[in-house]
Structures are given as structure tokens and as C-alpha cells.
Amino acid sequence: MTLLGVNIGGTTCSVVLGTADGQVLSREAFATPGRDECVARLRELAASMIRTDTVAVGISCGGPLDADAGIVLSPPNLPGWNEVPIVREIQQATGKPTFLMNDANAGALAEWYFGPDGGCSPLVFLTCGTGMGAGILIDGKPFDGACGMAGEVGHIRLSDDGPVGFGKRGSFEGWCSGGGFAQYAGINAKEAALLAQQGSGEHVGHFAEFGRRLGQALAMLIDVLNPQRIAIGGIFMRCEALIAPAMNEVLQRECLPQSLKACRIGPASSGEQIGDHAALAVARYHAQVDPLDQLLRRFPELAACRADIQSAADIICNTYRNGGKLLLCGNGGSMADCEHIAGELLKSFRRKRPVREPWADRLDSALRMQLESPLPAIPLGTFHAFTSAFGNDVDPAATAAQQAHALGDPEDVLLAISTSGDAGNIVAAAQVALAKGLSVIGLTGRSGGALVEHTDVCICVPADETYLIQEYHMPVYHAMCMMIEDEFFGDACNG
């Protein structure tokens, strides 16, 4: 398995092919040109470096971004990048699942995955490069805030006046970024560091001021977040000896002693590979992310359903482990959902499912290679001759119940889908299934209706109108299909 990383920086861009443990297999880098030329170059490199075993592409870029939509939204360090659909561009070039994350969160993930302090929580990463942003990880997951803007520490004002960064005079980014440093030092940080190391008192003073302002901001982060680890990239990583003394002096004076003692502060462990590792970390995070967590990030209003979704997936997994099958029933759009779910389970969904049973060796190799391992699922109501005959001869409202009676065994599970929860034929099927000893899962709307009383677990999505309920049902059952498939067919997304 390989990952592809795309790092978009204000100064340099790179595309890297690497492994899940951060080993870079190949790399191409170039100075950041204008938007259109840059996007074209990134597409070209990504397409040329992708491999068949590449499972995901990660893009690390300075914010602001709309990560869910895959769009770069006018970052101050990328002039002209106004609403650039970068995920669409790279995904079209590679044909692989592609994900976008701000460079601060991506750097934090790189520290978590590839650094020696990956188990630390909370973990904070500061970019400290062309701009200043923070990535905050809690238990290995980025903290995005209410609208994805958490971690924009560069906007914090540290003084009433001073260099401008993030559009604000005297801001953290103004004092502690490459662009801000050049404003008060008159030269860039790389040149100033050489002069300071040669004994220039003026430039030693500039780095001391940088350190004091960095300490001032870190003290706030430490007192508020109480992190175990703060990793700092960019200028601090390259000029630690010039910056750290003044920074530590301020921290000793300003921080709560217990919080400061608990926090290890130092340069990013990836060193100059931080941009490459950050992009690979984005790919790794999304390739391995738990489908339920991913669902709730996209639809936070479903958080109240989390326990029921997990329980439903667990019940279905246990059914499959015990040799049982999944029966599904619904009406109209819900019947279409039943067929959709069966389609995802009877063949591969996101993962390869090679047939490994011994009997497959009796087939010719071409046919054997075409087959995929199934998870047995039967949508009730699709037996049209039976349905019409039973409906005519007995009662249309009992057809699903009759099929549950005929096809259900105690080791099986019935997934009953009803937007209202009050569909009589679906409730009847659930009653029969429970009476026969099957497990029963309900998928319905906010009220749950009568179905709730005849299920072991009922997922009641937070909507009342039929079409809105159905719009929630699809991402819920897709997440469940992913969870079930993950359980039986490996640990890495096959794309």
C-alpha cells in the first residue's frame, strides 16, 4: 500500500509517493508559481507518480479552506487562489480518493503518525513558516471547531501595534512568521539567521523579539489547552538556538507552572520533511479513518444516533460471523434503499474481496478472478411472482412478514426501513422476525413510530419529512456498510 501527498506552500510545492510509516519513495518539488500553472504542474506530477497500490491522496495547504468541499479559499500566502477546487483537480488526475486539510492540522497529524510523541494528547503543531497556524489533535483526531476554523492562532493580537499578519497589526502571525519577520527585520529569516550566527547584535535582537512573542502566544495555548506536546515547524525548527532562550524566559514568567511542566515544546520531529510528511499524513488519516467518525464529521447532527449505528453494525457483523444473513424490507424509496444496501454487501464496496474458499480452485482462473467474496443480503419484496400471488390470495400488507417467516432463521438479522416507522407491513415483518428469534434493526425518522417497539436497535435520524429522512438514511447505511466491510476485509482502504 502506498499514499500520495501533495504539499502546497506559499514558497514551495511538492508531490511525494510514500508509505504509511512516512517513508518517502519518490518526490518532486518546485517553487510555487501562479495559480493556474501550479495546479497544472501538480496534476501532471500526481498523475505521473500514482501507482495501482496507492489507496489515497492527501493535500496539505494553508487556509482558509473548505476541506469537505475540497476547495482552497483565498489563503493570504497564495495570491489568486480564490475558490480553487483542488480536490476535484487532483482526483481527476489520479483517479484516487483525494482529501484536503489545512497545513497546520496536517502537520499535527504528521507529528502524531511519524514522530516520537505520537501518543501525546492534546498535541499542538505550529506552522511558523510563511504564515502562522495551529493544528490541534485530541486523541489523534483534528479539532476543527464549529465551522472548521479552529487553530487560526495567527489572528490573535499580541500587541496594539507591530508587523501585520493575517490582516491584523501586532498579530501572532505578524510577529512570528516569515512575512512578519521581514517587516521588522528588513530581511528574511534565513539571511538574518546567518548574520546573527556571525555576531550581528541587531539580528540576534530580532530573533529575541521573535522568541518573546512566540513565548507570549505559547503561554496562552498552554494555559488554555494544557497540551502534552507542542511541535513547531518552519523558522523555529531552523533557528531554535536563536529563538528558544527568549521564548523560555517568557514561558517561565507567564505560564501556569503545572501546565508548563506537563508540556514538551520543541521543533517538529520531521524536520525539513514536514511538508511532505504532512501531506502523506492527510492521505493516511482518511485512508484509515473510522467510517462512523467520518459520517459524524460530515453530518454532526447525527451524533445522537452514534451508539445505535454502532450497535446495528455490531449486530450485523455478529450475524455474519455466526453464518447468518441479512434480510431487508421497506416500501417505495426505502425498498430502493434495501436493494442498494444489498448491492453494497453482495460484492465489493470500497475494498477488494478476493474469493479464498477452497472450492474456488475447481474453477478456471479467469472466472475465479472475477468473483468477489459476498456478505449475504436478501431484500424482501423483490420476489415479484410471490408478492403478487400472496397479495392477491391473502393480504398485500403481510407479504414482507410472510417472507421473513419463510426466509428468516434465528441466526439472521432483519433491517426494517420505514421513514415514518408506522408502515404496517414493515412493522408486521419486524414482529414476525422477533417472534422467530431474529435480531431486528430499525432505520426510521425522528419519532421512530410503532417500529421502535419491535426492534432490538432503532436508528431514528433527526428529521421529520420523508425526503429529509431518506437523505439521512443513505449516508447512515453507507457508513454501516463500510464498517461491516472493514471488519471482514482488512484494515486499509482499497480506493
Image: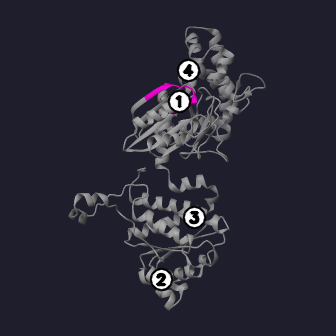
What range of the chain is rendered magenta? 28-39
- Determine the image quadrant of residue 23: top left
Sequence-wise, which precedes: disc 1 or disc 3? Answer: 1
Amino acid type, callout 3:
His
The residue that label 1 is drawn on is 38
348 left or right of 140? left
The verdict on residue 36 being magenta is yes
Query: x, y (%) of residue 331?
Result: 55, 75
Q: Disc 4 marks which amino acid?
A: Cys
Picture disc at residue 387: 2
Q: CA distance from mark 3 to mark 2?
A: 25 Å
- Measured along the vertical axis of the image, is residue 260 above or below residue 375? above
Circle 1 Cα neighbour tier, 10 Å, few/some/many (<14 / 14–19 / ≥20): some
Question: Element type at marker 4?
Answer: helix
Q: Tell me the quadrant of the picture where the N terminus can be found.
A: top left
Structural distance between the alpha carbons of marks 4 and 1: 29 Å
First in sequence, mark 3 or 2: give its number: 2
Q: Is residue 16 left or right of residue 222?
A: left
Look at the image and tell me whether residue 436 can be seen.
Answer: no
* Label 2 element class: helix
Residue 128 in percent (x, y) is at: 60, 28
